[in-house]
Image (tube, rainbow, N blue to C red):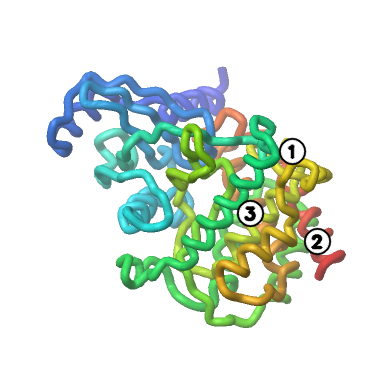
């Protein structure tokens, strides 16, 4: 076995495993009534922050940690996830109850937080084949409701007034993700270069809209009630910040434009939505606008194109971590092949709808 292969296997093992003995002693000191032993199993979904189900003598919890190894600046911000979910407790945006944030990386090798374990359903296929037409309509309506509720949060009242820099959201995000993409670039992709150039030349004027944004709002980041079409927990807040609400909306619509199997992302490309009871993009956007009290959304092609670009940059980062041997998912390496198709989809949107 080569030195690189050995390092990669060692790094993957550290991502997949926890030092449960040390964790148990730590949690006994931090959580009243906590008792061991701890049995930990890693959830298979997700590419960024390794997440574990902990079964303990005191009950069942979820632990979410940063991956070990060298990380890109501002990436894997589990402390921000903890903060925003704590701030949203009791709001119209359902979140798990967070219990403890550990910033001491010596405990398990990286920062982590603990939250309650929610019993519910997560759907991975955007076509919702498990449901009938009326149920599909209800689930998409609920996603729309929660998104509008998120963008209606009074950030000052929630204690999140300093959760991000207000204004010029797309300009700042473009700079951030362009930088992270270049830092993760393994080889030149002409379609990405062309997309980056177009986005930089077409940044929209700041319209003054500011809201809390999730950053990765999609079907499989929402846990629903075991029997009802009701969201009980919005998950994976790593990319949340103060930003522009249309970024979340376009990101969700972008993903629904993608093929059914796009790595870990399920889309509705070439799917007859009407026959399944799923709203069209036009109707979904119109329903959101109705909830937010606005007439229409201008610059839609830019918002969609930017969403494709940002997802491509995120995936490139996952591919780079796989190359370096410290990715959370065993499928991370093959995700890198999606970067070019995503850029080409964005260019197609720009050319046909811009």
Q: Nearer the viewer, residue 99 or 126?
A: 126
Label 3, label 2: how many angstroms apart (C-alpha)?
Answer: 15 Å
Quadrant showing the N terminus: top right
Quadrant assignment for the C terminus:
bottom right
User: Which residue is located at x 47 percent, y 38 percent?
Assistant: 225
**Under tag 2, what secondary structure?**
helix
- Secondary structure under the numbered disc 3 in the rendered image: helix
The residue sitting at the right extreme is 352
Distance (Cα) linking label 1 and label 2: 18 Å
Q: Would residue 10 be seen by someone viewing this image from the given angle?
A: yes
> Can you give x and y, in whole percent of width and height, for residue 49 in the image?
45, 41
Residue denoted by label 1: 260
Side of 343 relative to 242 (left or right): right
Q: Quadrant of residue 309?
A: bottom right
Between marks 3 and 2 in the image, the one whose residue lies nearer the viewer: 3
Point 61% across, 64% down: residue: 288
Q: Badges 1 and 2: C-beta atoms under 8 Å apart?
A: no
Give percent across and percent down for residue 23: 24, 29
Calculate the distance from the C-alpha at mark 3 to the C-alpha at mark 1: 14 Å
User: Crowding at label 1, few (<14), some or many (≥20) Cα neighbours within 10 Å?
Assistant: some
Q: Residue at x 49, y 74 (%)?
A: 210
Residue that carries the numbered disc 3 in the rendered image = 252
Q: Could one spot residue 235 in this view of the protein?
A: no
Q: Which residue is mark 2?
A: 349
Q: Is residue 65 above or below residue 257?
A: above
Residue that lies at the very extreme toward the front in this rendered image: 134
How many marks on residues? 3
């Amino acid at each position: 076995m080569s030195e690189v292969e050995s390092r990669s296997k060692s790094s993957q093992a550290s991502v997949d495993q926890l030092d449960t003995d040390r964790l148990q002693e730590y949690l006994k000191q931090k959580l009243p009534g906590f008792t061991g032993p701890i049995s930990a199993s890693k959830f298979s979904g997700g590419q960024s922050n390794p997440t574990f189900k902990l079964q303990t003598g005191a009950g069942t919890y979820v632990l979410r940690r940063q991956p070990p190894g060298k990380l890109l600046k501002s990436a894997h911000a589990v402390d921000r996830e903890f903060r925003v979910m704590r701030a949203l407790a009791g709001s119209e945006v359902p979140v798990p109850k967070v219990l403890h944030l550990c910033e001491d990386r010596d405990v398990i090798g990286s920062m982590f937080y603990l939250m309650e374990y929610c019993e519910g359903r997560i759907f991975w296929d955007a076509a919702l084949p498990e449901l009938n037409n009326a149920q599909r309509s209800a689930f998409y309506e609920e996603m729309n409701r929660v998104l509008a509720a998120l963008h209606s949060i009074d950030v000052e009242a929630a204690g999140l007034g300093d959760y991000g820099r207000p204004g010029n959201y797309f300009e700042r995000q473009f700079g951030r993700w362009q930088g992270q993409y270049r830092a993760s670039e393994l080889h030149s992709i002409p379609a990405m270069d062309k997309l980056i150039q177009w986005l930089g030349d077409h940044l929209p004027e700041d319209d003054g809209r500011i809201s809390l944004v999730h950053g990765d709002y999609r079907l499989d980041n929402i846990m629903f009630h075991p029997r009802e079409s009701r969201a009980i927990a919005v998950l994976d807040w790593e990319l949340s910040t103060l930003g522009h609400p249309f970024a979340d909306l376009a990101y969700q619509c972008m993903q629904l434009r993608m093929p059914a199997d796009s790595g870990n992302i399920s889309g509705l490309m070439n799917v007859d939505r009407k026959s399944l009871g799923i709203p069209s993009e036009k109707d979904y956007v119109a329903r959101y606008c109705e909830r937010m009290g606005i007439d229409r959304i201008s610059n839609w092609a830019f918002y969609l194109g930017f969403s494709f670009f940002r997802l491509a940059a995120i995936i490139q980062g996952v591919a780079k971590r796989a190359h370096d041997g410290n990715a959370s998912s065993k499928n991370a390496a093959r995700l890198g092949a999606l970067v070019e198709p995503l850029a080409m989809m964005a260019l197609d949107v720009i050319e046909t709808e811009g």
